Amino acid sequence: MTIALVQSANGQTSGLTVTATLGSTPSAGNLLVAFFANRNGLAATTISMNNSFGSHVQRRYTGATAGEWPVVLWYKFASGYESTSMTATTTTSNNIVICVAEFSGVGSFDASSGADSFTTAATATFSPASGKEILLVSGCIARTDTTPQNFAPGGSMTELFEAGGRPPSAFNYQIIANSSGSYTVGSTGASTSRKGLWYASFIGSPANVAAFYATVIA
């Protein structure tokens, strides 16, 4: 079995809590990735996820003042007993968005990084583990409040979710059968407003590698 997108959901609201409701309970062992963007968060803001997501992997800011506008990434491997309601809670908010995606065929976390000083293009070059089946994910947010960015995904990424405003943000992914070298991640927006970006890579299950080479030999 190769890496595949199983399902995704998103939510957007004005308040302290936002929920994305998946269509079905995630299957045990599948990867869950949650992307969160906050229109008015601060460095001291506490942001948490239900369903035992634990600590975030990346947290970036894009505001004119250091610590504003956080973009957060969580991930976990499903137990099979999670609620379909994926909820993020923050202590400081104006407008918040969340996107949660489930992927099958993922074996382990690889690496992550990000930056918070982009303008029109919130893109970066990223080199995941070589010679592996790889899942790339990226999320970005623009400092503009209500202006839609009409984000275009960078490189060969596919946009899974975009919030047009409050806050303008986007979540992308890409599945690579056999990684080699570097890849472009992130999105390009319509305005030059300051943007933040996080991105991460995950390695396919060892069983995927065996299946891949069996196909090549056949």
Image: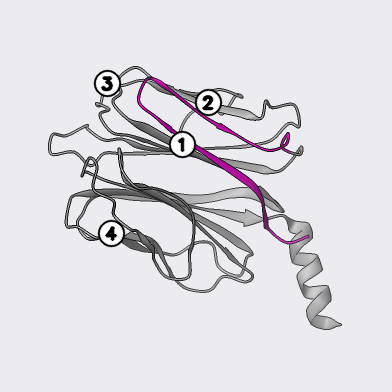
Q: Are marks 3 and 1 in contact (CB under 8 Å)?
A: no
Choose the circle earlier in sequence order: 4 or 1: 1
Residue found at x 53% / y 74%: 180
16 relative position to 68: left or right: right
Choose the circle earlier in sequence order: 2 or 4: 2
Q: Nearer the viewer, mark 3 or mark 1?
A: 1
In the displayed structure, 15 sits above or below 119; it is: above
- Label 4: state its secondary structure: loop
Residue under circle 2? 87
Q: Label 4, label 1: how many angstroms apart (C-alpha)? A: 19 Å
Magenta-drawn segment: 1-26
Residue type, label 4: Gly
Where is the N terminus found, in terms of image quarters? bottom right
Q: Are marks 2 and 4 in contact (CB under 8 Å)?
A: no
Where is the C terminus found, in terms of image quarters? bottom right
Residue found at x 22% / y 32%: 68
Residue type, label 1: Ile
Residue under circle 3? 44
Residue under circle 1? 98
Please provide percent x and percent y for residue 51. Answer: 61, 24
Please provide percent x and percent y for residue 46. Answer: 36, 20
* Residue 93 shows in this picture: yes
Please provide percent x and percent y for residue 206. Answer: 74, 57
Residue found at x 35% / y 59%: 151
Residue under circle 4? 189
In the image, farthest residue toward the left: 64
Q: Label 3, label 1: how many angstroms apart (C-alpha)? A: 20 Å
Q: Nearer the viewer, mark 3 or mark 4?
A: 4
